Amino acid sequence: MYTLYMAKGSSALAAHILLEEIGATYETEVLSVPAGDHLAPGYLAVNPRGRVPALKTPHGVITENPAILAYLAQAHPEKSLAPEDPFSFARAQSANMYLASTMHPAFAHKLRGARYADDPAAIEAMKAKVPANIRECARLVEDHLLQGPWVLGADYSMCDPYFFLVHRWMAANDVSLDDFPGISAHVRAMKARPATNAALAQHIP
Ligand SMILES: N[C@@H](CCC(=O)N[C@@H](CS)C(=O)NCC(=O)O)C(=O)O
């Protein structure tokens, strides 16, 4: 039994989709970020970083999207959601880490500029740069990371639910999918999967 600590519409959607793909037994704890639930003492005891997602497992809590996705894939090897050989696994991790370390933070500058600067003008300047940065990240995803039809090529993997977030980060910044046929096809393929829709249904505000 797993517990997914999530906020609706957040990056927790990736692990949520993977839990549905696995057919895992899980429950959700739904937090409201605008209400500050993620900073309440009860949740900080689960994840001192004050972010969602967090996944409670029989062994303890895991945080950070790539770690949660890799754990779920490796804990359920029968579902073949991660490559087994070290090189291919590292390539999969590299793709997921790009989202975690570059694209997601680029998106976060829209709402979280105050983490990086105190000067209101600097915060506004950071916010203004977000659409251009998201477009640049999407270009790298399109041209180098998304092999097609799935992120790793022929087989669906732990990377696909995470890369499903890319089009949401694009939409939130008016970056049209029109110039990104690979990402567009990936979105369509993801939306055709029952697991994606089962998770999405639980993220309706
Ligand atoms: N590096 C973390 C980032 C998680 C993250 O920033 N989550 C957002 C929601 S998508 C959050 O909790 N935001 C609240 C905040 O930044 O205070 C991960 O990949 O899991």
Image (spheres, helix red, strand yellow):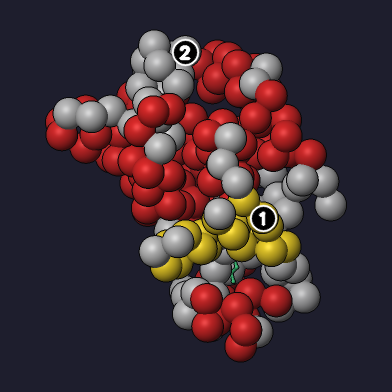
Q: Which is more toward the observer, 37 or 114?
A: 37
* Residue 183: image location, x then y, percent: 54, 22
Name the image quarter holding residue 175.
Answer: top right
Q: Is residue 55 above or below residue 84?
A: below
Q: Is residue 4 above or below residue 94?
A: below
Q: Residue at x 55, y 68 (%)?
A: 51
Q: Residue at x 43, y 27 (%)?
A: 79
Q: Which residue bears the numbered disc 1?
A: 27
Where's ligand 1: which quadrant? bottom right
Q: Which is more toward the observer, 149 or 45?
A: 45
Element type where label 2 sits in the image: loop
Q: Looking at the image, can residue 81 be seen?
A: yes
Q: Which is more toward the observer, 14 or 135?
A: 14
Position of 11 with respect to 58 (left or right) is: right
Q: Looking at the image, can residue 117 be seen?
A: no
Query: Any atom of ligand 1 within 8 Å of the CB at mark 2?
Result: no
